[in-house]
Amino acid sequence: MILPSNFEQKIGFAQLREMLESLCLSALGRQFVAKMQFQSKHDQLEKLLLQTDEFRALLLSGADFPSQHYHDVHPHLVRASLPGAYLDVPAFFAVKMSLRTIRQALTFFTHAEETLYPTLRLLGIGVQVDRNLLAALDKVVDDEGQVRDNASPLLSQLRQELINRQGMLRKQIAGILRHAKTEGWVPGDAEPTIRGGRLVLPVIAEHKRRVKGLIHDESASGQTVFIEPEAVFELNNDIKDLENAYQRELIRILTHLTDQLRPHIPDLRRAYQYLGLLDFIRAKALLAGRLEATLPVLHPRPLIQWKKVRHPLLYLSFREHFKDNPREVVPLDMELNPDQRILLISGPNAGGKSVSMKTVGLVQYMLQCGLLIPAGDGSEAGVFDDIFLDIGDEQSLENDLSTYSSHLLSMKQFVTLAGKRSLVLIDEFGTGTEPALGGAIAEAVLDQLNRARSFGVITTHYTNLKNFAERTPGIVNGAMRYDPEQLQPLYRLEIGKPGSSFAIEIARKIGLPKQIVERATQLVGKDKIRYDRLLEGLEKEKADLEQRNAEAAKAERRMKKAAQEYQDLRKHLDETTLEVLRNAKAQAKLLLKDTNQQIEATIAEIRSNQADKEKTKDARQKLDTFVREKLQMEPPKPKASREAADPKTLKPGDKVALIGQDGYGELISIKGKTAEVLFGGMKTIVKASQLEKVGRAEIREREKKAEKASFSSSASLGMDLTGRMANFSPVLDLRGERAEDALQKVMAFVDDAVMLGIPEIKFLHGRGNGVLRQVVRDYLHRVRAAASVADEHADRGGDGATVAVLK
């Protein structure tokens, strides 16, 4: 149950509903937005949230999911269900393109990994788009919404005859117009125009008897008359007859196509229900992206355990209005659990009490409407059966209710209806009447809500309520932080202690006369002043302690960073030392082997020359040169090393590689155990545990190699492209091929054509049972480089061949 009836307007959800409607692509999605409502069943709510979260991941992945032609064709289906009725060309175009979108969506989820979008995949169960129906629609209407000339042989013939007759007509009337201009019967800039569906000439009224023909119309001023020359009567009649015949044949084709569509209407209604649902979920995912919203851990019991939650409307407003000078919404850490069910928030005016309470109401309502919430990672949430709200001034002249009476009526409903699965939200509890009485009634109501084990967030200034919360289990005080020196709100919620209103201090700071402030201090009493000053002192001590903790944490982070750098350096030195030692040992063994061989060869040479001085001297010089060359060898350079990636230390911009792979890419973002990496211009989502960081030394080494290879590779590539362009044929014969083999050839053929800049390509697939034609065209429709896909001209193969124009 949701109270009051205008809850969505009061809490701000109506604005989010309008945003969702604006993010929908069609009326189909907007219908779902209008029907979106509060869900209290855990299983159903979890399914809705998972759908939105999976679609959010889909959008972040950059996958090529269809986002066009989400048409609402239900009025066309109603018309098509009537026997004898037929749909016009625009209606069939909308049906064809939207059915193609549905088919592409189903194919996308079928081909995707099962673990990526399991909940969205289930939505498509039972949804069917008949391939033959789609082919029949495509045969009549092209992708530009025009009727194909080859929709039937007669239509093609009539179209050709119309073109011929119209050419003849234009030629004849151009001759008549030239003669009339020469004679001065028509204005010098006159052109033929259409009146009553026939081609006529604009003739100056005083010369209308000079041109033989039929007057069809005259201008508003009466100075120009529109005459159909006698010489083109027959041609105009022929054209009119051909147009009528063309229209009759078109209606026959459309009627036949409507008859083909009619048996599929039940399946089509389910398909368009699926399309509208996809549009709705897509809009929710887009809104989640704008809010940087996430999916919390969902429990079936009432629970609020949010980390860094933000008010969604405030967040969007700040981002929109403070682009040049960014302002951040101060996030809240909010927790309501069975031991701490009711939070009583106090603090100064304009300190953020009401915003905190509204944040709880709006975010919980968003969650139970199936929307992701703007909360940080690690947040947990539960399900409530009811949300009750009392906020603002509800006084009514018609019902003779004062502000306080309206609050009491709300309290009556709350204590009567609230239970252990209810969330109660009350702003400025107890105000509107004499403070002592209002505080007493508020305390009694709060006690009753606590006995009912209800959950709630309540804001107040009343000291008796703060004291009651302090001594009552199940209720906890909360304070909006305030800077007592600057007398400025910090908009941070601290749970566990009450807040001060700082009324006397604020009055003194803004310059209220001193005698008034002192008199007010006397009237309020020493105990109250002492209580507020105690809270003020605690606030100062809290601020000082936070500053010291922040400085200590900063110093600790510096020490950890220095220790990590030391460990990394030591690890690098140890690895480098081991590598150098291994290489040195290997070099020493090789040097020793070569040296022994050289010494033995020198001794043998001396012996063979019987210790001849000159020969001995030469042999010793050779030995010295050998030793000198061997000893002057440069030590091997240490290889660039990699280190295993720690998800906690990874940040956007780091260079990473998949474990065991040579190539590397740039880290775009990391969320939990999942990372988004840009490999060669392609975004890929991988597990962070599969990554390792690439060191700067390896990157510099690869860049040097790439620079050396660039010239030779570019030259060879240019020669290769020239040769391939010379040998490339724009016609691919697929006749007799199996569908799988044909698809591979088509993919390679299109890639080559795009790379070589070929403007138009052609596929020969024959007619047969239409499998090859469907394979070719399904793939071409998914290729962005294809500007248009159509049948070949009837004289050159017709629908037995497909022609594609490339961008």
Image (cartoon, helix red, strand yellow):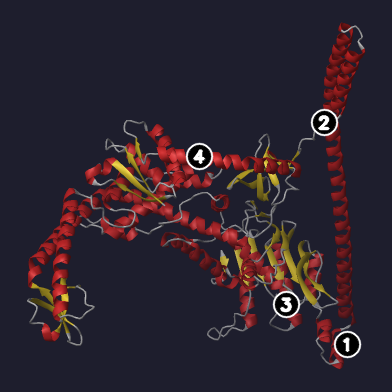
What crowding class fits label 4: few (fewer than 14 Cα within 10 Å), some (14-19), or many (20 or more)? Answer: few
Task: List x then y, in percent, for residue 127.
Answer: 40, 46
Which residue is labeled 3 in the image?
350
Which residue is labeled 1 in the image?
522
Which residue is labeled 2 in the image?
579
Measured Cα–Cα span from mark 3 to mark 2: 66 Å
- In the rendered structure, the answer to whether residue 281 lies left or right of residue 753 reads right
Q: Earlier in the sequence, mark 1 or mark 4?
A: 1
Residue in the image at 19% along x and 52% along y: 156
Task: List x then y, in percent, for residue 600.
Answer: 87, 11
Q: Nearer the viewer, residue 556 or 495?
A: 556
Residue at disc 1, secondary structure = helix
Residue at disc 4, secondary structure = helix
Which residue is labeled 4 in the image?
719
Image quadrant occupied by the N terminus: bottom right
Residue at disc 2, secondary structure = helix
Tell us which disc is closer to us: 1 or 2: 2
Whether tag 1 and tag 2 are in contact, CB under 8 A, the answer is no
Task: List x then y, in percent, for residue 778.
Answer: 38, 44
Q: Earlier in the sequence, mark 3 or mark 2?
A: 3
Q: Earlier in the sequence, mark 4 or mark 3?
A: 3
Q: Earlier in the sequence, mark 1 or mark 3?
A: 3
Q: Earlier in the sequence, mark 1 or mark 2?
A: 1
Residue at disc 3, secondary structure = loop
The disc labelled 1 sits on which kind of residue? Gln
The disc labelled 2 sits on which kind of residue? Glu
The disc labelled 3 sits on which kind of residue? Ala
